[in-house]
Image: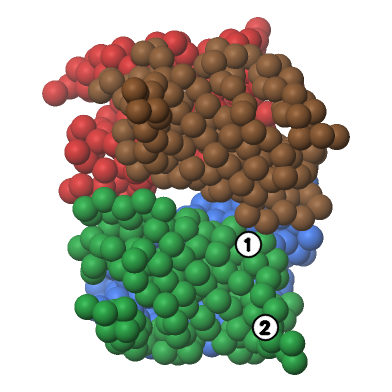
Chain colours: A blue, B green, C brown, D red
Amino acid sequence: MTDKTSLEFARDILANQPFSNLLGTEIHDFGGGKAEVSMPLRPEFQQQHGFAHGGAVGYLADVAMAFAGGSVLGDSVTVEYKVNFIRPGKGDRLIGRAKVIASGRTQAVVSCEIFTADSGVDGDTEKICAAAQGTFRKV
Amino acid sequence: MTDKTSLEFARDILANQPFSNLLGTEIHDFGGGKAEVSMPLRPEFQQQHGFAHGGAVGYLADVAMAFAGGSVLGDSVTVEYKVNFIRPGKGDRLIGRAKVIASGRTQAVVSCEIFTADSGVDGDTEKICAAAQGTFRKV
Amino acid sequence: MTDKTSLEFARDILANQPFSNLLGTEIHDFGGGKAEVSMPLRPEFQQQHGFAHGGAVGYLADVAMAFAGGSVLGDSVTVEYKVNFIRPGKGDRLIGRAKVIASGRTQAVVSCEIFTADSGVDGDTEKICAAAQGTFRKV
Amino acid sequence: MTDKTSLEFARDILANQPFSNLLGTEIHDFGGGKAEVSMPLRPEFQQQHGFAHGGAVGYLADVAMAFAGGSVLGDSVTVEYKVNFIRPGKGDRLIGRAKVIASGRTQAVVSCEIFTADSGVDGDTEKICAAAQGTFRKV
């Protein structure tokens, strides 16, 4: 299976997640214990102060880590995760980059960083927004 | 401030969260270090296997804990939280019940349980779906 | 197996943990998804400010939760836990009380509160010192 | 302050932690948001199966992250941390390597990996044993 095929496989899974469709999530990289996903920061994803709702940030961390873990485990579920909020989420979109710290036959420990991205004339400006760590288990 | 007024105050904050409006979240109890919230389990909140997306479950835990923490801290932010997934989320709706474990002048440690609820002829059947613990800080 | 026998069984396991012997840990209650343990707050368990070292507090949370989880799972291991530090640890001893939030055939989610205790003429004064939540898996 | 002086400063703090003296912890690197510490795996630090007690592993993660966080914050306390256990701890010693993911004026989010190390004729063999993430706050 080539990397391109792996990514297409991941896109199919994401396309079958109604919640990810609702939020406009895309996957850009998948395989070898890594994944990169992003979602647009639409006004309807904000909390009362105009920043990305923490629940949207946590959602993207879960998705990024689940795909990174799934790239080594196959079909798997989120056992648990924790997320630290570092900076208010604002800008064009959120990017989640996850990588497997360690994995065995049935379980993977995965970490993730979430960045806010803003497109400008000089290209993208990224700032870290949150960091997460979680446990994923093969089903 | 009466309890009823407190709850109305909390409803106003929730109504000012576009993401919570998008997801149809309601708050039923607020005050004294506790909060109860719920969201409908619409088909568009599912993952690829027909269960509630973990990101939706995590979102509701964040909301429930932020309100419980806010009831003792006032305006505050989520520093971090962790969530354990216990059972697939299915049924009519998700209910989040959070309570402050301990709080000081600037910080509260809060725990939360998320339940799935199904309405039937004999009334609601609730099952625990997830458990969370987090840190909230006054701003 | 009576409760008394269960507690004796737990005491045997604890007695076979060299690290718990080094720290003087005792178990007072065990069974039905619950456990209570304690350790003395000896001067050699302190950090540089004269309070219990966070690592000692975290250790006791791990022990309390592992026994609570083990009371429903049998022989099991700690998958992960998180601990929030609430108040500096000082006094005569630390007490850890853990209970299973939910458990299945192979896994339990457990929470724990750690208290500092000080013996006085009016009996013990307990204050909450830390709160933890973790995942335990049958082996 | 040169790096050497920073490391000496960190060694002085560690030397003032009775619990770290009891466990034989050493610090090898400190500064710029990073820290490396180690502790010997003495028989008295084991649990009932002959591996390092999880509480000892969690302790070392706390120490490593507190020093990494302290290198950017100055005097600070552990707000909370989570630790995932990856592989049983055995060998000559445990090594903890922590680095700051992000920090502001008052708070740092830090991650850590714990390795077991075994000295042999061909040099050290290291294996990852645990991974942690935590929050540290300036006092």
Q: Nearer the viewer, mark 2 or mark 1?
A: 2
Earlier sequence position, callout 2 versus callout 1: 1
Q: Position of residue C92 (x, y in %)?
A: 39, 21
- B64 lies left or right of C80: left
Q: Residue at x 50, y 63 (%)?
A: B112
- A47 lies left or right of D57: left
Type of amino acid under label 2: Asp
Name the residue at the front extreme: C122
**Relative to residue D32, is residue D9 depicted above or below?**
above
Quarter in which the N terminus of chain C is drawn? top right
Q: Residue at x 67, y 61 (%)?
A: B86
Q: Write down the residue under mark 1.
A: B85
Q: Foreground: D64 or B133? A: B133
Q: Pointers 2 and 1 in contact (CB under 8 A)?
A: no
Secondary structure under badge 1? Answer: strand
Residue D79 seen by the camera: yes
> Total label count?
2
Q: Write down the residue under mark 2.
A: B124
Q: Foreground: C66 or A57? A: C66
Q: Foreground: A120 or A67? A: A67
**Relative to residue A30, is residue C43 depicted above or below?**
above
